[in-house]
Amino acid sequence: THDYSEAATRDFFIDLLLAEAGWPLEDDRDREYEVSGMPGGKQGFVDYVLWGDDGLPLAVVEAKRTTLNVTKGQQQAKLYADCLAAEFGRRPIIFYTNGYEHMLWDDTFYPPRDVAGFYTKSELELLIQRRTTRVPLADVSINRDIVERYYQERAIRRTTEHFEVDRQLKSLLVMATGSGKTRTVIALSDVLMRANWAKRVLFLADRTALVTQAVKALK
């Protein structure tokens, strides 16, 4: 409930969280980086720029005071990303935060989403890399050794379209008992991993017996 100023929010919250993610912020250009090309031809100063080892920006961080809604920083962060993309030829990942809430936005693919904190350098590099190494999901075949029913394939294709065409992050499949939910999700995971859209998959179930059953099916 305390109304920290933007400067205090940076000092007490954002700097600490960035340090925990491996960003020491020791270089002058890490904070208040000056950019040109803002609306009206004005100069702008990016609160934080997270740089890659190649000297190119991996991410921008826009900070707001704690009592402001975190979304207040979205448009300004986007404008800074536009300026950095024009200057360096690579669009950075966008973060905006009020110290308590943190939003991540790779606007080349997905809408903004809330995250627990900031990404490490290697995690940001992977996000940037996937922009060019992903294979279109529609071009990846479904393994018919895993699924062979038409509705399973249809479910997989609609889910991949939801991710790729609709640019959404979540999808829900509702399938009856015995319809092959486990095999469907295994085949879906297989498509995502072969297309370099996913590196690891977390499979959850609400009973130990279902986990054991799923492990056997996955193997």
Image (spheres, helix red, strand yellow):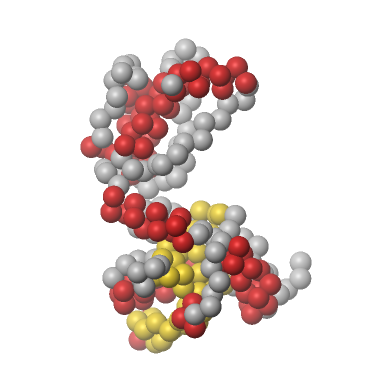
Residue 133 visible in this rendered orientation of the protein: yes
Using the image, determine if residue 29 lies above or below residue 158.
Answer: below
| Count of marks placed on residues | 0
Q: Quadrant of the N terminus?
A: bottom right
Please state the horizontal and vertical placement of residue 90, each as a whole percent of the image. Answer: 32, 67
Residue extending farthest right: 1
The x, y position of residue 211, in whole percent, is 56, 22
- Seen at 65% across and 62% down, the residue is 100
Task: Locate residue 138 relative to residue 129 in the image: left or right.
Answer: left
- Left or right: 94 in relation to 84: right
Give coordinates of residue 21: x percent, y percent.
56, 61
Q: Nearer the viewer, residue 95 or 88?
A: 88
Location of residue 200 by image quarter? top left
User: Which quarter shows the C terminus?
Assistant: top left
User: In x, y percent, where is residue 122?
Assistant: 44, 57
- Which residue is more in the foreground, 192 or 97? 192
Q: Is residue 6 left or right of residue 154?
A: right
Q: Quadrant of residue 67?
A: bottom right
Q: Quick check: 91 above or below 167?
A: below
Residue 69 in sight here = no
Name, please, the residue furthest toward the left: 139
Q: Residue at x 34, y 52 (%)?
A: 130
